Image (cartoon, rainbow, N blue to C red):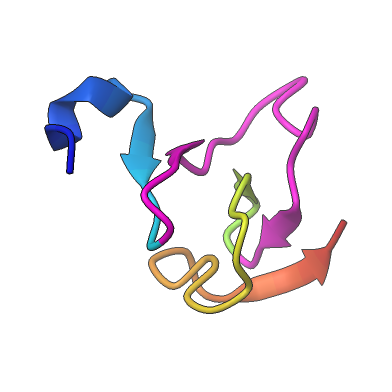
Amino acid sequence: MPNLAECGSDYYRNTDGVCVHRPSAGPGTADGATALCTDGSYTYSQNRRGTCSGHGGVRAWL
């Protein structure tokens, strides 16, 4: 498995080994997002399990 640092600071490696953008908030961040977290941040998660777990859970799937 490649080094986790290869994903970049704004990304994480998901359970499938794919680099995914970390949840973010602000104008334009919904582009490509898969869910809106309870804390208002958007996530780009590719799996429903654990999505927004550090952000209060999922408010809405997009």
Q: Which residues are magenta?
A: 16-38
Q: Which SS type dominates the magenta stretch?
A: loop
Q: 36 or 20, which lies in front?
A: 20
Residue 6: image location, x then y, percent: 22, 22
Residue at 38 percent across and 32 percent down: it is: 11
Q: In this rendering, would 57 be left or right of 30?
A: left
Residue 3: image location, x then y, percent: 12, 32
Residue 9: image location, x then y, percent: 27, 23
Q: Does the magenta-highlighted stretch encompass residue 22? A: yes
Residue 52: image location, x then y, percent: 52, 66
Residue at 54 percent across and 36 percent down: it is: 24
Residue at 15 percent across and 27 percent down: it is: 5
Quadrant (top left, top right, bottom left, bottom right) of the N terminus: top left
The answer to whether any part of residue 9 appears in the image is no
Q: 61 or 41, which lies in front?
A: 61
Quarter assignment of residue 39: bottom right
The answer to whether any part of residue 39 appears in the image is yes
Most distant residue in the front direction: 1
Q: Does the magenta-highlighted stretch encompass residue 6? A: no
Residue at 51 percent across and 43 percent down: it is: 23
Total marks shown come to: 0
Q: In this rendering, would 54 be left or right of 45?
A: left
Residue 51 vs 20, above or below: the answer is: below
Q: In this rendering, would 45 be left or right of 16?
A: right
